Amino acid sequence: MKQARKKRRLTIAEFSAVRPLLNISEDRINAAYAALVEGRTLQSIGTEYGWSRQSVNDTVDVVYKWLDNYRQAQKAEINALNQELPPDWECALICGPKELIARMANFKTELATNNPGLTHEEAEIAIR
């Protein structure tokens, strides 16, 4: 018995991040969005645009290739940032309420003020 293929999906944020990297037509971008974010079938998208299912799949493959490149670049950036931090520090992306994020931004100034050995540049790297 043939096993169903797992559907490839992206969040709106993932698609938005990779969209500026795509060097394909607006129709192809919209078709990829329909498949990856909205979860529509390749056949229905192909019918809408007058393309084959394979053509839509090729477009999805292009987006996935760029998504992989984007993720590798993010990892490389985090690794590079971690190299610049003191040995017992680690880089992390934090999401939260606006008030908390504002407090973290203010913490950067406090961090530099209360740690005379820490340069403003190091504090900027620490709270970016």
Image (spheres, rainbow, N blue to C red):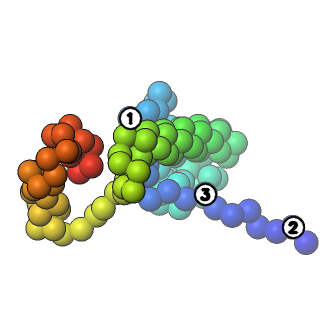
Please tell me whether residue 57 is drawn above or below residue 114 in the rendered image: above
Q: Amino acid at mark 1?
A: Pro
Q: Helix, strand, or loop for circle 2?
A: loop
Give the left or right position of residue 119, taking residue 43 as reference. left
What label does residue 8 carry, if any? 3
- Labelled pair 2, 3 in contact (Cβ < 8 Å): no
Asked whether residue 124 is in view, the answer is: no
x then y, percent, for residue 60: 59, 44
What label does residue 20 carry, if any? 1
* Residue in the foreground of this view, choosing between 58 and 50: 58
Q: Amino acid at mark 2?
A: Lys
* Residue in the foreground of this view, choosing between 71 and 77: 77
Mark 3, other Cα within 10 Å: few <14 / some 14–19 / many ≥20 = few
Give the left or right position of residue 109, taking residue 71 as reference. left
Spatial separation of the CA atoms under disc 2 and disc 3: 18 Å
- Labelled pair 3, 1 in contact (Cβ < 8 Å): no
**Nearest to viewer (mark 2 / mark 3):** 3
Q: Residue at x 15, y 40 (%)?
A: 120
Spatial separation of the CA atoms under disc 3 and disc 1: 20 Å
What label does residue 2 carry, if any? 2
